[in-house]
Amino acid sequence: MEELGVLLLVLGAVYLAECVLWLPRGSAALARRTLRGWRLLFPGRISGNERRGAVLADPLLPAGHVLVVHPWPVSLSPSGVRAGAPHVLEADERPRGDGEFLAYERLGSLAVRGRDLIVDSRVFVSAASPSAARRLADLLGRLGRLPETARARAIEDALASSLDSRVVEERLGVLLARSRSLGRVCGGLLVYLFLLAPIVMRQAGPQRSWKPLLAGLLLLDAAALLLYRRAHRALFPEDREERWASLLAMALSPPAAARAAAHLSRDLLDGVHPLAAARALCSGRIYRELARRVLLDVRHPVRSESLDGDPRAESTSGWFRAALLRALERDLRAAGVDSEALLSPPEPHDPAARAYCPRCRDQFVGGAETCPDCGGLPLVAFPDSRACA
């Protein structure tokens, strides 16, 4: 039965490949782990490139959902919009995007094509998914129709909405209700592929068993496709192109169909800030650590070279970071977290340490004045009472 072993190895490799998500740098995934609840995962450093990195979902949970979260793809102000994320989730990341600024008056020709927002027949910014692109286009359209004096409040309301953890709970509840049957079929398909079918083939032989096994496989695969289509259409009614692309891939690959529930949940939290997702689903320790990273980057941003030469872009980035910081601090207070305690100076790790970077918290000795890893941010000296002789 050497052929059976080879077949199982191939199916296993394909299934593991389906468990890998390639996430854009700057994003994160919340995935269920066996007996360990929700975990926050970041794109791998080794397994990836400058733009994307790999995240491995739990292969033992075929019905386990994986939720991808992203920071805002743009910075907003009452005067216009700047392409590019206002902050990152990891200290060694850098803001991405070309930093182009557009006044709202220039957005009259705004259109959506897939994940891209098109202005004047060219891509202005790419969102995380088609649904995220539509949400962003709707927001920009509403801001463009408002008088400039009313835009600040509208942007602050949008920030507050993106940080509302109740939205996460509501969407996840809808997902679980819509995908319960799909999850059972995915689990059954996994057991069929890697346990039941090999046992039957070994006992009865390939010649006698392949036809009934193929019929059973086609039946389970068709059930997964039908339930996926129904759930996806209910959750993402406008994403027809993406829906049919996923259905085609799962029709051609039963291991892909076994991960249908995970595929369904990937874009569920479009428009939700990563902190809101972490607050709703993760432990307090994970939530506080992510909050600390975000606060440090928002308070001490790395200057983007793409801002050079356009003061409007720099002004918009500064305005949006200030509004985001206020929203983050309000949300942390509501969660019972002291933001100042999160950002307290680190303890010196070495008697010779004299200063630290306010963003990445690396410590320096001697006469260093700036952090080379954070774009030359000025260092902060340790308080005299804590500095070591």
Image: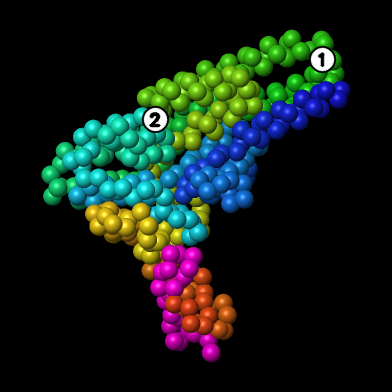
Query: In front of the other: label 1 or label 2?
Result: 2
The answer to whether residue 230 is above or below residue 48 is above
- Magenta-span inclusion, residue 380: yes
Q: Is residue 279 left or right of residue 213?
A: left
- Magenta-span inclusion, residue 227: no
Helix or strand or loop: what does disc 2 sit on? loop
Q: Amino acid at mark 1?
A: Pro
Image mark for residue 38: none
Give me the residue at 53% from left, 80% from top: 365
Comparing 85 with 345, the one in front is: 85
Helix or strand or loop: what does disc 1 sit on? helix
Q: Taking the image as drawn, is residue 192 in sight? A: yes
Image coords of residue 121 (percent x, y): 30, 32
Q: Taking the image as drawn, is residue 72 in sight? A: no
Residue that mark 2 sits on = 114
Give me the residue at 55% from left, 84% from top: 352
The answer to whether residue 240 is above or below residue 280 is above
Q: Is residue 144 left or right of residue 234?
A: left
The answer to whether residue 21 is above or below residue 93 is above
N-terminal label among 1 and 2: 2
Mark 2, other Cα within 10 Å: few <14 / some 14–19 / many ≥20: some
Real-space Cα separation, disc 1 to disc 2, in angstroms: 45 Å
Give me the residue at 55% from left, 28% from top: 260
Q: Amino acid at mark 2?
A: Gly
Q: Which residues are magenta?
A: 370-389
Give me the residue at 41% from left, 53% from top: 95
Image mark for residue 206: 1
Quarter of the figure with the N terminus: top right
